[in-house]
Structures are given as C-alpha cells and as structure tokens.
Amino acid sequence: MTTPTRAEAFAALTAPGQTYELQTVSTARGPQLVFVNLPQTLPELYASCVSDAEFLVLDDERLTYRETYDQIAGLARVLVEEFAVGKGDRVAISMRNYPEWMTAFAAVSCIGGIAVGMNSLWTTEEMDYALRDAAPKVLIADRERLEQFHQLPDLGISTISVRAEGLANDVHQLIAAFAPAGGAASMPQVEVAPDDPVVILYTSGSTGHPKGVLSSHRAVLHTVYAWEFFALQSAAMRPTDAAPSPTGHRPASLLGIPLFHVMGLHGGFVSSWRAQRRLVCMTKWDVAKAAELIEREHITGFSAPPAMTGDLVREAQRSQRDLSSLLSVGGGGAARAPEQVRQIDQTFQQAMPSIGWGMTETNAAGTYIAGEEYLLHPNSAGYTLAVVELRVVDNDDRPLPASERGELQVRGTVMFDEYWNRPDAMADSFADGDWFRTGDVAYLDDEGLLYIVDRIKDLIIRGGENIGCGQVEAALLAHPDVIEAAVYAVPDERLGEEVAATIHATPGLDLETLRDFLSGHLARHEVPRYIFVSDAPLPRTATGKVLKRELRIEGSARVAG
C-alpha cells in the first residue's frame, strides 16, 4: 500500500465532513481560511478538555485538568466581581513559569479580557514602559516583579500577588485565596467571540521600546490547530513501521521556555491543554535540572530555541541520565545549525528533531518540519502550515520564483490584529494590504520548503558583496569545538563592512585551525576577519536570542582599538 503525498494527505484530512475541514469565512480581517469543526474560542477549548488526568507539575505540586479549571473559574470570578475587569480590559501577568501564570491567562481569556504577557527579566524601566503602554486594570505578579513594581510611581493598577508570602495582604491578595471554599467555582458567563482580542505579547526588539502584539482567540487557536494538523498530516504520510516505538508513558512536555513568549504560551500551555498532555514546569533554565526532570517525569517532548536544545544534547552526552522517554526535540525562535540537527538524531534513542519558523506577529505559526525530512533538509525551516500563506518578494514587493532570494512575507488566520498603540508601525509593516513584511531574507524551493537566509538588517555588505550572517554562523557551529557563535558586521575603512564573530568554545581552540576549517566551508571573503572568543556563554534575551547588538558594539570597539 502506497502512502499518500503531502498534498493528498492535506486534501483528505480537510475535506467536507472531516474533523479538520477547512472553509473560507468572513472575519473582521476579511476572508480567512478556518477550521470549522473545532472550538473557536479559548473558553470553549478549556471547557471541552476538562478531565481528571494530571496536567501541571511544578516540583512536588501537581494539578489535574479539573483542579486547574476550578482555579481558572475562581480567579475569573474574582477578576469580574472584585476588580471589575470587563471585555477588552487588560490584565498584566509578570512572573516566572508558575502554574499561576497559566491560570491567570486562562481566567482573563474566559471573561473577554486581554492578557498582557510581560517579560519577567525586564528592568524596572522596561516594566514601567509596558505598564504605561498597555494600561492594565490589574497586575498579577510574583514577589520579584512586585518589588520592581513598588519602585514605580502610582499607576493606578491593582495587584494580585503570587507566591509572595509576607507581603502586606491589605495591599496584595494571594491568588491561592481565590480557590472556592465549598467546591468548584462557577465560570462567569461572558460572551466571547473568535475575533475578540485576547493577548498582548511584546516583541524583543534590539533597539528602542518593544512593540505590543495584539492577537485574537481565532489567531491563537489556529496556531495550535495548525501544529496539530501538521502532525496528523505527517503521520498519514508515514509508513506504519516508521512510527516511533511506544514508550509506555503518557505524553508529557517540559516547559523550559518563558510563558511570555509565543512558544511557551501557545506551544506549551494551550497546545498541552488541547492535547491532554502533562506539562512539567521549570521556573528558570538549568540543563542539569532539565535532564533530571526528563528522567523522573518521563518527558516525551521538549521544544526550545537552539541554544537550549544544544545544552540538552551536551548534557545527554555528559551525564548518565536516562532520557529514553524523549520522542521529540523541537525548536524555534532562531535558526538551528545543521550539525545540531544531526547531533539530536545521534544522541537520543528515539527522539527526532523538529523545528518551525514563526514570529510573535504570526503567533509562532508559519512553517514546520520534523523527523527524516528534517534530517534530509537540516537547513530548512519547513513546510508552510495550513491557514498560512508565504511568499518571497523583491524590493518592489513583486513575488519571486522558487529558489530566488528576497524578503519573506506572510498572511493568514494566525496573524496578529495590530501593534498596540502603534498605528505608525502597522502602516510600515504590510504590503498589498495584508502581506506582513517579516524582515527575513528567504527563499522557497521547488518542494515548498522554506529556507531563512538571514535578517535583512543583519546582512553584511563587504565591498559590495552580500554575506549572510546565518551561513557563517552555521559554518562556525559545524566545528566540534565551537559551542555558540554570533556573526555581525564591524566598520571597515576600505570595504565599508567586515565580517566579525564572537564565539563561545571549548578551552584551547586554536583560531588559525578554526580559520582553516572555515575555508573549507565558506568563500574566502565570508571567513570572519575578526574572531573574538568569550569564556562565558553568549548573552541572550529571555527567549533565547543572542544579543547580537551588544556583541556588535563590543566587537566594533575592539576593532577600533
């Protein structure tokens, strides 16, 4: 029996009457392709998936889906009755990856509010900016973030404290106090529509203030469904004997990335609720702790930026932990070096590598690739997901043919609604009405696979030659002694820009030997003229992206002498 092609599997699974039937419907953003037979709002999703199975785990704390839903309902009622939060009102969430983060997000979404996910690593000044920008009625925060909040002038924001015992209860109310005394609390009855806004997440810009990205229930849910559908489509194309062997363990994910990031919130919380997948929380990244949790909790899936999955590969090679329960090691948020793709396959018994491309503006959805296909195309970001459209264009926004490089643009049901309070940014971000300018240099091959070449602003123009930082970084990371690499431009009087790199490597790496290695992988003009070695891991944002701007400033200063 022959297995269906990707297109045949897509057509069969989305046909009329099928669970994942697709239809074009009229929305506030115009005609959009939607899944018609699935829950259309987050409250519908939560209610449809309540069970007595274990859901959230943090150290020795364990909550079932039903217990979590009861807490969601209890907090939702308090927000409505005690804090007068109504439709469209904002509620800010600022804390580590505690279960209360997810309880708070769900409660806000059930009453038609807009949850504002705040970066827990922000400085006090950055917190001040976001609170003034989003103007929430309530801030739900843990001790560290409340201590920052108290340093700010009075913003007229009520607070609810989380895991902050000892703070004055006449000012802060413990979220635990909202648990119903005599049983499950009833969920407030609020009419919520698919196109209602539900979340603001801030982009991690390298300069200036971050932009608040506002998205709807429909966009968030269609991201989750698109991932789910891709997995089913891939399974339909796979021969039965190629499926992973069952581990005997219930599906469980390790939440190691922040919930204020789309990968953590949508890929971690919302997707796990939908899939009845146990979710084991980490409040900060510690690779040794992660390996311990994978072994103890029989984790079957872990997804994180390449820096973290690279950490896990090295820990698996170093330690004696039993990580055999892992079936998948996913990625996103940054490009993964092809060498790491191969290392994942070689290091773990069953876990297959996967990766996706997406942005905060696309709610993390865009492309996906996994398993053998990813091993065959380790430089690729994957196939376009359902309800997403991609195109590559020239400088005049004219679509380019396959394999030609240009700017990647995207549209579809997963797209954000607007930049909060930034109509100027909205006007500059779209082409031909609804095509979002990603700022990525990319191409699509004849099979429809996406390849991200670089960020437009990260291109190095050396004597008129365009050099992609990503290509040079991949070559550096292919060397067995290079752990991390960041490539950037530094000023050069003759050429305009010159190639520089900062690397974190194993002790004793000889730079001339490294350059000889690179000469076998790169053109002569692409080999970095300047290579700086950092004794410590490269600085990163909370979402795992290298702070390249800081390294560029430091590298430029060193070059200037």
Image (spheres, rainbow, N blue to C red):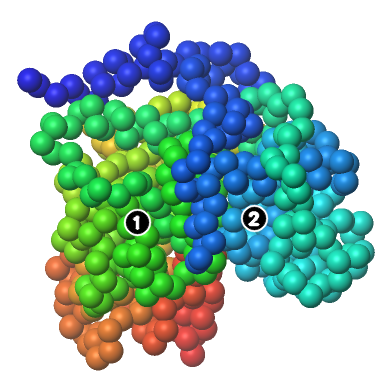
Residue 420: name its quadrant. Answer: top right
- Mark 2, residue position: 100
In three-dimensional space, the C-alpha distance between marks 1 and 2, rounded to whole angstroms, equals 21 Å
Query: At x 38% / y 50%, what residue is drawn?
Result: 252
Residue 326: name its quadrant. Answer: bottom left
Q: Residue furthest left?
A: 1
Q: Percent x, y for residue 36?
A: 50, 16
User: Which amino acid type corresponds to the residue marked 1 in the rendered image?
Assistant: Ile
Query: At x 40% / y 27%, what residue is drawn?
Result: 386
Q: The N terminus is located in which quarter?
A: top left
Asked if the residue at tag 2 contacts the one at tag 1, i.e. Cβ–Cβ closer than 8 Å, the answer is no
Q: Residue furthest top?
A: 16
Look at the numbered disc 2 and give the secondary structure of its residue. helix
Q: Is residue 372 left or right of residue 493?
A: left
Q: In this view, does 135 lie to the left or right of 39?
A: right
Between 557 and 534, the one lying in front of the other is 534
- From where the camera sits, is residue 43 visible? yes
Query: At x 38% / y 14%, what residue is drawn?
Result: 18
- From where the camera sits, is residue 358 visible? no
Q: Earlier in the sequence, mark 1 or mark 2?
A: 2
Q: Percent x, y for residue 251?
A: 35, 46
Q: Percent x, y for residue 374?
A: 23, 46
Query: At x 30% / y 16%, what residue is drawn?
Result: 11
Q: Is residue 122 left or right of residue 446?
A: right
Q: Percent x, y for residue 55?
A: 49, 48
Q: In this view, does 331 lie above or below 504?
A: above
User: Which amino acid type corresponds to the residue marked 2 in the rendered image?
Assistant: Glu
| Numbered circle sitting on residue 299 | 1
